[in-house]
Structures are given as C-alpha cells and as structure tokens.
Image: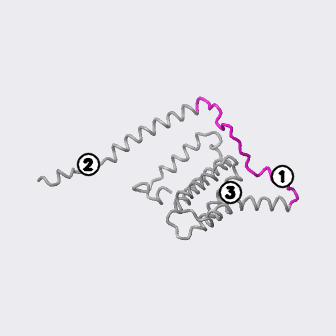
Amino acid sequence: MLSQFKMFQQISYLPAFAYILLTALFPYWDAISSGLIANSLVIWILVKLLRLYDQSQPKTLEFNIGLIVGISILLYEPIAILIPVVLFALTIIRPFKLPEWMVLLMGILVPFYFMFAYVFLTNQTTAFTQFLPKLDWKNPLVRPAMNVIIALVVIGVQLLIGLYYWQQHSRLDYPLPTQLHQG
C-alpha cells in the first residue's frame, strides 16, 4: 500500500516488517486469529478508500468496501465501529449522492443476508442473532499487564527517536533566494 501510493521514495519492506512485529506484541495477534484477519481487512479497506478519491464510477469500489466491512464484522464483532468510520470517510472523500451511500450500505448488509439465508435454510433462525454485532459502551481496555505497558513505552520512545533522525536526514540544504542572486 505504501509503495502503491508513493508514500516513500523507494520500495521498502520495512512497513510490512514493522506491521508483523507490532502485531506480534499483542496477545491475540501473535497467532492467526479472527482479530488479526479483521485487522488485515481494515488495511484493505483503507487501500480501497484511498482509491475512491479519483474514481468517476465509484459504485463498484463502494460495494467492495461495504462487502469487506460486512465480512470483517462477521469475523470480529468489535470491528462494527467501522460502519460509522467508513460512512464518515465517504462523506469526506466523495460529494453526497444517495445512490452511492445505498450501494455502500448494501455491500455492508450482503454478508449478513447470506448468513441469514443459510441459517433460514438450515431451519435455525433463532441462531441468527448470534451473528449480529453486540454493541455496548463499556471500555474494552482492561488494565494491561506491565510487559504490554513497557513494550508500548519502548515503541513510543523508538518512534520519537526515529522521527527525530528522519527529520534530520530529510532536511535538505537549499540555498536561500538571496544567496542565489549574489555571486
């Protein structure tokens, strides 16, 4: 994604490596789980949203974004917060057109439609409610363990040091306009 949108001057595997290292720090992401897959789907949604900016016919892309959001919600319920995030992103990126919003919402609902169709055809309609996201307003973060706090502090310090050195390295010495005319 970073190479495709030219966020770095050269192609590098460093962001992918950093992603793998950071996901290994969290207890539920150090193995292949629904949370890790949903996190990867969120990155895919971000790529699709970035492509949405310059599309003349965006409905296919919007449906795909909605479909990925719906699938990620089925995989990992806490990602249901992505629905307002994607709607907000659509508000920022595209001018409001009701058909585009309906296509996005239809894409979000399609995985639930297929899940309900399967549950209905197997005559288990009471089990459908277990697939719907259960939203509550509790704080999902419990008091983290000391090793998680230390790891996050070390990551933060390294990030600040890296930003400092990056700023020093990327600063170019251009001559001032007054220096150009002297000579």
In the picture, the disc for residue 127 is: 1
Where residue 86 sits, quadrant-wise, is: bottom right
| Residue 40: numbered disc | none
Under mark 2, the amino acid is: Asp
Q: Position of residue 39 (x, y in %)?
A: 61, 50
Label located before the other in sequence (3 or 2)? 3
Q: Nearer the viewer, residue 16 or 48?
A: 48
Residue pointed to by mark 2:
173
- Left or right for 152, reference 70: left
Where residue 132 sits: x, y (%)? 75, 51
x, y percentage for residue 85?
Answer: 60, 52
Residue at image point 70% right, 48% down? 77
Taking the view exactly as shown, the residue that stands out farthest to the left is 183
Q: Amino acid at mark 3?
A: Gly
Q: Residue furthest top?
A: 146
Label whose residue precedes the other's in the sequence (2 or 1): 1
Q: Secondary structure at mark 3?
A: helix
Give the magenta part as a residue range.
Answer: 122-147
Under circle 1, the secondary element is helix
Name the secondary structure under disc 2.
loop
Which numbered circle lies on residue 70? 3
